Image (cartoon, helix red, strand yellow):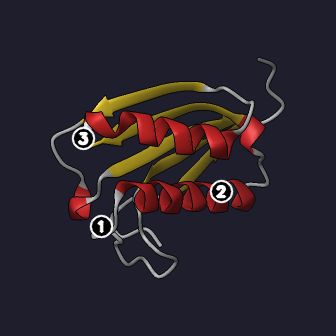
């Protein structure tokens, strides 16, 4: 599904690096005309698909980086992310940025470490 010159996920030993995920549907169509709530849920669904692909769980996520074009949307992003991730609390960055590819409102990347101890 990658549209550029990169891999969605790269694994080295017990670490996996998930590239920036945008609100794209399973056919790679940008859903950027949708509200932030819809976009974050789509990105988290895409992240979940990556986890399934590497046989990892949400609890294997060590770090998440989120980029949002409107930092005022942080409370909504935080609420939906917390609902999705549950009690697990990986390291996290939320950064306000000027713009994202396709006009997306959010992009998420993650680092996964299997058999980690936090």
User: Where's residue 34, x and y in %?
Assistant: 34, 68
Q: Earlier in the sequence, mark 1 or mark 2?
A: 1
Q: Position of residue 97 (x, y in %)?
A: 22, 37
Contact between labelled residues 3 and 1, with CB atoms less than 8 Å apart: no
Q: Which residue is mark 3?
A: 70
* Residue underneath mark 2: 48
Q: Residue at x 47, y 73 (%)?
A: 1
Q: Secondary structure at mark 2?
A: helix
Q: 76 above or below 1?
A: above
Q: Quadrant of the C terminus?
A: top right
Residue 21: x and y in percent read 44, 55
The kind of secondary structure element at disc 1 is loop
On the image, which quarter does residue 93 sit in? top left
> Which residue is labeled 1 in the image?
32
Of circles 3 and 2, which is in front?
Answer: 3
Can residue 11 be seen by looking at this rendering?
yes
């Amino acid at each position: 599904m990658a549209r550029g010159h990169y891999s969605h996920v790269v694994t080295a030993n017990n670490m996996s690096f998930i590239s920036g995920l945008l609100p794209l549907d399973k056919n790679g169509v940008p859903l950027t005309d949708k509200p932030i709530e819809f976009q974050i849920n789509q990105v988290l669904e895409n992240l979940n698909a990556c986890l399934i692909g590497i046989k990892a769980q949400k609890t294997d996520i060590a770090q998440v980086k989120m980029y949002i074009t409107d930092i005022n949307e942080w409370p909504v992003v935080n609420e939906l992310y917390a609902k999705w991730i549950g009690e697990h609390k990986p390291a996290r960055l939320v950064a306000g940025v000027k713009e994202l590819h396709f006009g997306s409102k959010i992009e998420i990347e993650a680092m996964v470490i299997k058999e980690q101890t936090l």
